[in-house]
Amino acid sequence: MSTSEQPPVGAVEARPPVSLSPSRASDFMQCPLLYRFRVIDRLPEKPSAAATRGTLVHAVLERLFDAPAVERTVPRAKALIPGQWDRLLESRPELAELFAEDAPGTDPTEPRAERLARWLSEAEALVERWFTLEDPTRLEPAERELFVETELASGLRLRGVIDRVDVAPTGEVRIVDYKTGKAPRPEYSEGALFQMKFYALVVWRLRNVVPRRLQLVYLGSGDVLTYDPVEADLLRVERKLHALWEAIRLATETGDWRPRPTKLCGWCDHQAVCPEFGGTPPVYPLPVVPARPPESAE
């Protein structure tokens, strides 16, 4: 970049993200502008009671396996909830505002203590339902909350966190993910499995083993969705991720992040800055200008 091409003082360059996770890949497929708001602009988002409850339940199910198999009971799991909630609050004090009297979408006449108690009882119900879907006394996870990361031959780096990895004595791998919502209708199951196939691809590239089973445990509805992948499935996912990454790279360079309106827009935190709702996005950072090759001295 020549002196005349230098960005103004204080300008920030938009650099392509260095990795892709299942969540961010799903964001881009749902709405490229949402991806930009979260990854490029890093706009803050308000915590939600539902998402926070999911975080709490995940923590309880992870910690339950610290106990010997015979002690993994419903009462013990429920007893973990207050302590895990305290730990979550300690790390994110702003979550306490979810139960304030003036919190959006809540009954202002309901006392804060009652609101919190009701929310915690909902978490208890989800934890208790899990015991009707799986028997933790017969499970010995090889990994819990496992961070995985790999770099494909193309240079694309994939990363994510797997809720649970089970390994059979024969070496077969099962990837398990807990969902605190309800299972999707059959016509939408492919979208739900995308995250699991993403993880399966990462595990395959890391360990040279195709997971035997992918399992989604829906605590909100009491359903279990399973899928047994093969190499061809994972190769298709790999090609899809490369195409996504190329689209993300192009959008980063051009600044062309187009909104994609869907029913999910009603839950988006960024309506105020979205053109679909009459808003104006933040000024886009200057795109990175690729280095030019040195001119030949002929």
Image (cartoon, rainbow, N blue to C red):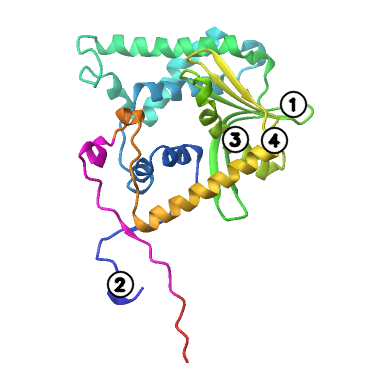
Mark toward the start of the polypeptide (2 vs 3):
2
Q: Residue furthest bottom?
A: 298
Mark 3, residues whose alpha carbon is within 10 Å: few (<14), some, or many (≥20)? many
Q: Is residue 283 left or right of residue 232?
A: left
- Read off the residue under disc 1: 168
Q: Nearer the viewer, mark 2 or mark 1?
A: 2
Can residue 19 be seen here? The reply is no
> CB of mark 4 within 8 Å of CB of mark 2?
no
The image shows residue 171 at horizontal and vertical percentages of: 76, 31
Mark toward the start of the polypeptide (1 vs 4):
1
User: In the image, what residue type sits under mark 4?
Assistant: Val
The dot on residue 5 is: 2
294, 45: nearer the viewer: 294
- Read off the residue under disc 4: 230
Q: State the predominant SS element of the stretch in magenta.
A: loop
Residue at position x 47%, y 20% from top?
180
Residue at position x 62%, y 40% from top?
201
User: In the image, what residue type sits under mark 1?
Assistant: Ala
Residue at position x 59%, y 55% from top?
154
157, 103: nearer the viewer: 157
Element under disc 4: loop
Mark 1, residues whose alpha carbon is within 10 Å: few (<14), some, or many (≥20)? few
Magenta-colored span: 270-292
User: In the image, what residue type sits under mark 2?
Assistant: Glu
Mark toward the start of the polypeptide (3 vs 1):
1
User: In the image, what residue type sits under mark 3?
Assistant: Lys
Q: Nearer the viewer, mark 1 or mark 4?
A: 4
Q: Hey, which quadrant is residue 95 in on the image?
A: top left
Element under disc 2: helix
- Read off the residue under disc 3: 197
The residues tagged by marks 4 and 2 sit, at their Cα atoms, a distance apart of 50 Å
